[in-house]
Image: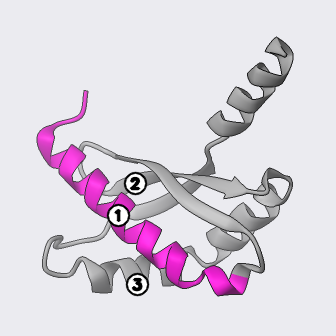
Amino acid sequence: METTRQQKISRLLQKELSTIFLGVAHNFQGILISTTKVHVSPDLSVARVYLSIVPSERGEEMLQLINEKSVSIRHDLAGRTRFQLRTVPELTFYIDDSLDYMEHIDNLLK
């Protein structure tokens, strides 16, 4: 169970990461990246970031690119949250495939 502090930091990171991905969207040529969930470890040193990538066919490719750029993303995040956080957690990115799963179930029910 997450503490109140973890929840607040998760929401802050989700909001700021969404803004960062929106700002660099022109580099991704028609690919929409949104931050769906952020989970912060109890010691606030690691954040697991779940991304929804549309179209999902290019999800693995984009995830690899984002992981390569994670240092610069963390640097941008540190600049945006410098007054709220003392240290920015290490970021690990994952694909959130819940929308694909819902679409698959919907297709099965039709």
Q: Is residue 17 magenta?
A: yes
Q: Nearer the viewer, residue 98 or 106?
A: 106
Magenta highlight: main SS: helix
Q: CA distance from mark 1 to mark 3?
A: 13 Å
Question: Which SS class for mark 1?
Answer: helix
Q: Amino acid at mark 3?
A: Asp
Q: Quadrant of the C terminus?
A: top right
Q: Residue at label 2?
A: 47
Give me the residue at 16% from left, 37% from top.
Answer: 3
Discs 1/3, front: 1
Q: Position of residue 101 (x, y in %)?
A: 72, 29
Indicate which disc residue 76 carries.
Answer: 3
Left or right placement of residue 71 versus residue 103 in this view = left
Which stretch appears magenta?
A: 1-27
Q: What is the image's colouring?
A: one colour
Q: CA distance from mark 3 to mark 2?
A: 15 Å
Indicate which disc residue 15 carries.
Answer: 1
**Between discs 1 and 3, the one toward the N terminus:** 1
Give me the residue at 76% from left, 74% from top.
Answer: 30
Q: CA distance from mark 1 to mark 2?
A: 14 Å
